[in-house]
Amino acid sequence: MDLAELEVELRGLQKKALSDIATTEAVASLDELGSSLLGKRGAITDLLRGIGGLPAEDRPKVGVIANEVRAAIEAALEARRGSVGAAELTARIERERIDTTTPGPAPRLGSLHPIPETIGAIARIMGNFGFTVAEGQEIEDDVTNFQLLNIPEDHPSRDLWDTLYLREPGRLLRTHTSPGQIRTMRATTPPIRVILPGRCFRYEAVDASHGFEFHQVEGLLVDRGATLADLKGILDELARGLFGPQAKTRFRPGYYPFTEPSVAVDVSWGGAKDGWMTILGAGMVHPTVLENGGIDPETHQGFAFGLGVERIAMLRHGISDLRAFLEDDVRFLEALR
Ligand code: DAH
């Protein structure tokens, strides 16, 4: 082969390569084509094997032509890669298009347990009358749970509270939220308007309407000139807030050592199986209890109430067995949504 022949071959290769490139439709095929032309074992390298047979002065000329051919092929590959690549991307975007308006899987929504739900409802209603929420403590001492509430040791009224005592002398699980009255009165000064929600414990045989663990919300107002009529008015509003505008309350005489007079309060909620149901105990705070809280009963009066949260939650949600509150059955919660 002489220089002229080799040049014809190289130019021919270039021409064929450019037309192949122009008709190749995929980036991957262009890559293959590129290495079959330009690679170590490619067509150009192949042709240049013949260079050894040329006279020395012709060899650089072949090199120049070969570089031109190579550069032309590379440029054509590059340009074609650009347009084929763009077309591939467009096709892929089209193929993988997602309809973002399709509804997604529905999220599983949780719901509040009826006990905190009911406490929240009570807190909102009482909040309208200026009551704030505070917490007592679940482990109490005998002094605060009983004695400062005017229930001396060995007093027969202790039978009202079947108490779970702790091994440590004088310590017990609170039987009601009323000791929070003492703690609040000692920690603040009148006027006081507070509710104290929380868990209480009693040594009880468990059945559909009794639990050894249950919740109360204590209410306490201490101010100059507070009366039983104020208590009645607030409890009426509370009943209406919880059960609707048709709800009514009724006071019956009651007995608690820490109030004088004491009342038991029934609610008629006007629902399907209406009737009177006792939901709380209340009364005017006993002067001795005010004194124990550091308040002068000559200048200040107070009323207090303690209501059973489970009972109210049962009425609000039509639950007939209080044990359901403590069972971890999700279906119970889902049914209340
Ligand atoms: N602590 C009482 C109970 O557990 C309920 C109660 C009655 C609370 C009268 C009060 C009250 O604040 O004034 O049965």
Image: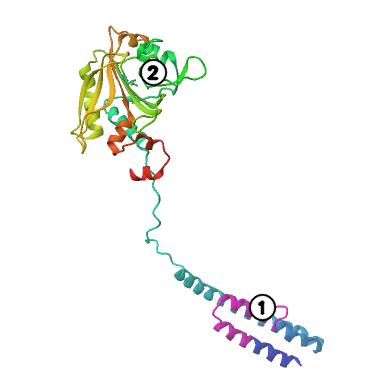
Q: Work out whether residue 156 or residue 312 is closer to the camera in this orientation and state it.
A: 156
Q: Which residue is mark 1?
A: 35
- Where, quadrant-wise, is the N terminus in this rendering? bottom right
Q: Work out whether residue 312 or residue 55 is closer to the camera in this orientation and state it.
A: 312
Q: Which residues are magenta?
A: 14-42
Q: Is residue 92 above or below residue 311?
A: below
The kind of residue on which mark 1 rests is: Ser
Q: Which residue is mark 2?
A: 179
Q: Residue 246 in the image: x percent, y percent? A: 18, 33
- Where, quadrant-wise, is the C terminus in this rendering? top left
Q: Residue 154 in the image: x percent, y percent? A: 40, 10
- Tally of numbered tags: 2
Q: Is any part of residue 163 visible from this angle?
A: yes
Q: Does the magenta stretch mainly form a helix, a strand or a loop?
A: helix
* Ligand 1 visible in quadrant: top left
Q: CA distance from mark 2 to mark 1?
A: 89 Å
Q: Helix, strand, or loop for circle 1?
A: helix
CB at mark 1 closer than 8 A to ligand 1?
A: no
Q: Is any part of residue 61 visible from this angle?
A: no
Residue positioned 27% across, 30% down in the render? 125
Q: Helix, strand, or loop for circle 2?
A: helix
Residue positioned 42% across, 21% down in the render? 174
Which quarter of the figure has residue 66?
bottom right
Q: Residue furthest left?
A: 246
Q: Work out whether residue 138 or residue 173 is closer to the camera in this orientation and state it.
A: 173
The kind of residue on which mark 2 rests is: Pro
Which quarter of the figure has residue 180?
top left
Q: Which color scheme is applied? A: rainbow
Q: Which mark is residue 277?
A: none
Q: Is residue 93 left or right of residue 185?
A: right
